[in-house]
Image: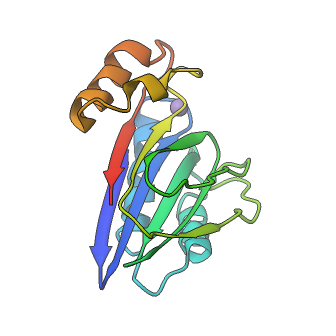
Amino acid sequence: MGFVREIAGVTWVMLVDALGHGPKAAEAAALAVEAAEQFTAAFSVERAFALLHERLHGSRGAAAALLRFEATALSFAGVGNVELRTLAGPPIPYMATNGVLGARMPQPRVGEIELSEPGRALLFTDGIARGTPLHAMVGLDPELLCDTLIAKHSLERDDATVLHVAY
Ligand SMILES: [Mn+2]
């Protein structure tokens, strides 16, 4: 499930993928979104992950990537199997930490970069096939890019979510 929240000059972007599928997974994803609705501009990425972890306790658990945009800076981190690729602009050296929100969450590795120029990034869950040739699809219109990934590169055994972010 994708989530965007703009508050007091900060934009939060989250992609959450609950473990498994069905009603229990939907419940976990909904809990994550409820928690994310409480992120403020003062929250750090660490604090946001701590809140997600706490709220997901007792649920199926989830993986998530979190981006926190300010005017000229971006901080980011991920826990579990959610991917991020930079399509344009300053490279985002995203590397998720192994873990499950709600169950076991090591301290996420939070990165930060300056946003000196506009960029585009793509976040996607592990329902998108590994090795999908994203570089060959960068020129596509964002909506078509997302549609193509879901239609042609998603796995049968998992549900897939793709989030395109331009900044
Ligand atoms: Mn998944």
Q: Is residue 147 above or below residue 79?
A: above
* Residue drawn at 56 percent across, 42 percent down: 82
Is 41 in front, or is 93?
Answer: 93
The residue at the point 59 percent across, 22 percent down is 130
Please identify the quadrant where the N terminus is shown: top left
Q: How is the image coloured?
A: rainbow
Q: Is 12 located above or below residue 44 in the figure?
A: above
The quadrant of the rendering that contains the C terminus is bottom left
Q: Quadrant of residue 111?
A: bottom right
Horizontal arrangement in the rendering, residue 32 relative to residue 56 (left or right): left
Residue drawn at x 34%, y 69% as measured from the top left = 37
Q: Which of the 4 image quarters holds residue 81?
A: top right
Q: Is residue 28 above or below residue 52?
A: above
Query: Outermost residue toward the right?
Result: 106
Q: Is residue 131 left or right of residue 69?
A: right
Of 34 and 160, nearer the camera is 160
Q: Position of residue 4 (x, y in %)?
A: 31, 60
How many discs appear? 0
Horizontal side, residue 71 vs residue 83: left or right: left
Measured as percent of width and height from the top left, residue 92 is found at: 56, 55
Spot occupied by residue 7 in the image (x, y as percentages of width and height): 30, 79
Q: Residue at x 59, y 47 (%)?
A: 61
Q: Is residue 129 positioned above or below 91 on the image?
A: above
Left or right: 98 as drawn, with respect to 26: right
